[in-house]
Image: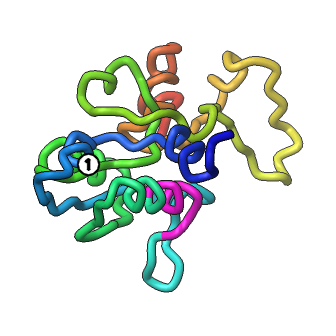
Amino acid sequence: MKTPQKLISQCLLIAGLLGALTQAAQAVELKAVTQNLPPFSSLVDGKVVGFSNELLDLVLKESGHTLASKELQPWVRAYAMAQEQPNTLIYTMARTPERQSLFQWVGPISKRRIYLYKHRDRKDINLKSLDDARRYTIGVLRESASAKELVESGFEVGKHLDL
């Protein structure tokens, strides 16, 4: 039977400069960035916490590496930092075909689902299909996999989607 740490490390999604984690002979100062995405990651008393952070910490401990910093950033900024800044990894992000070759990946931490939410007092909104949502404006996170998927499904920014 696998130990919990090994099982957890196999289920962790960390993208970015993970090649540095496998180069034990080379001391590399790593920075980690993520977004506010409870329960995976959030800021509590000035510290980044959450399920993804616990998994990242276990993987780093198992590999013998440490982080110079762990930052919670707006999604677009975190995504840009991971692509532009050396030795920066990003974690808790959807693995999409467009992103596949941009990062080195380590397993999934959960299934990805897109949900549409409405205010509980809006009894008039009852969607039977995704097409029914076209009658409303949907707020989505700029550059998110969900926004891109909705655009690919025919939703238009400015008409159906508010970034």
Q: Residue at x 36, y 37 (%)?
A: 143
Q: Position of residue 22 (x, y in %)?
A: 25, 43
Decide: is 162 above or below 63. Answer: above
| Magenta run includes residue 52 | yes
Q: Residue at x 49, y 73 (%)?
A: 43
Split into 4 quadrants, where in the image is the N terminus? Answer: top right
Q: Residue at x 28, y 49 (%)?
A: 89
Split into 4 quadrants, where in the image is the C terminus? Answer: top left
Closest to the observer, 121 or 114: 114
Q: Residue at x 45, y 15 (%)?
A: 152
Q: What is the magenta segment's predominant secondary structure?
A: helix
Secondary structure category for the residue under label 1: helix
Neighbor class of circle 1 (other Cα within 10 Å; few <14, some 14-19, many 20+) is: some
Residue projecting furthest to the bottom: 45
| Magenta run includes residue 157 | no
Q: Position of residue 157 (x, y in %)?
A: 42, 29
Decide: is 121 above or below 61. Answer: above
Q: Position of residue 115 (x, y in %)?
A: 67, 36
What residue sits right under mark 1 in the picture?
21
What's the residue type where badge 1 is placed?
Leu
Region of the chain picked out in magenta, as a range: 49-56
Decide: is 127 above or below 55. Answer: above
